[in-house]
Each structure stands twice: as structure tokens, then as C-alpha cells.
Image (cartoon, grey):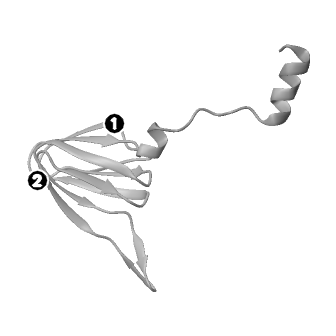
Amino acid sequence: MITALSQAPDSIVLEPGQSLRTSVEAGAWLQLAEGSARVVSPPGWFGETVFMTETLLEEGDMHRLPHGGWIEVSALTPVHLRVHAPMAARAAAPVQPRPVMRLVRLLTGW
């Protein structure tokens, strides 16, 4: 059975034989909390050839996805997988107001 999601959930639980296709952002981390799973990477290009890599994850393994796109996670045993957002997304700097807005705030007291 294959299920598809347009965005990866924070936590994925699968039974043996189940698969999930989901979209992930570049730089996302997968952490296998329990079980054994096969992860197929998003399609990439090598010259004029499309390729996908396959990674086997065991309990406790972490895997970084350098490229965003659709992945497929297949459970070999009962699986509990956590998806972590890219570090850049979590550590984003607070947005600074543009200089014009700072001037408006100074002049109006807003």
C-alpha cells in the first residue's frame, strides 16, 4: 500500500510493507526512531540522466536530504520516522524592517 502526502508530516508510522511518498524541503533530516526502512531520494540529474538513490535506515540512524522533492519511505519492519525541518528554516533570523519603514515609524511614532 502506497500513500502520498503533499507535505511531510513531523512523524511517520508505517507497518511492514507500507510505503509513503511525501514532499520534503532541501536540507530536511530524517530520524528513524524505531524499525528499519528504505528511503528513495528525490530524482536528481547526472548529466542527461535522471537518477534516484536508495538508503537503508536502521533504528537510530539520521539521514539528511540535500535536495528537496518527493521521497518514498518503505517500511521493512514497523517504523517510526521523524522528519525535521532544514536547519536554515529553524534558525531563520528575525525579519528587520526596511529603512523606509523605520523612518516612517520614527516620524509618526507608530
Tell me which amino acid carries mark 2. Answer: Leu
Q: Is residue 13 above or below residue 62?
A: above
Observer able to see residue 31:
yes
Q: Quadrant of the C terminus?
A: top right
Q: Residue at x 32, y 48 (%)?
A: 29
Label 1 or label 2, whichever lies nearer to me, is 1
Task: Tell me if 5 is positioned left or right of 63 in this view.
Answer: right
Observer able to see residue 1:
no
Q: Percent from the top left, x then y, of residue 22?
A: 37, 50
- Residue under label 2: 76
Q: Percent from the top left, x then y, of residue 96?
A: 68, 33
Task: Tell me if 16 is positioned left or right of 41 in this view.
Answer: left
Q: Percent from the top left, x then y, of residue 18?
A: 19, 49
Res. 79 image quadrant: top left
Secondary structure at badge 2 equals: loop
Q: Is residue 39 above or below residue 60?
A: below
Task: Tell me if 1 is positioned left or right of 52 in this view.
Answer: left
Q: Percent from the top left, x then y, of residue 84?
A: 34, 41
Density class for disc 1 (Cα within 10 Å; few <14, some 14-19, many ≥20) is few
Q: Residue farthest to the right? A: 107
- Residue under label 1: 10
Pick whichever, 72 or 34, lies toward us. Answer: 34
Q: Residue at x 38, y 60 (%)?
A: 66
Tell me which amino acid carries mark 1. Answer: Asp
Secondary structure at badge 1 equals: loop
* Among numbered discs 1 and 2, the one appearing first in the sequence: 1
Q: Residue farthest to the top? A: 109
Q: Residue at x 46, y 86 (%)?
A: 48
Q: CA distance from mark 1 to mark 2?
A: 20 Å
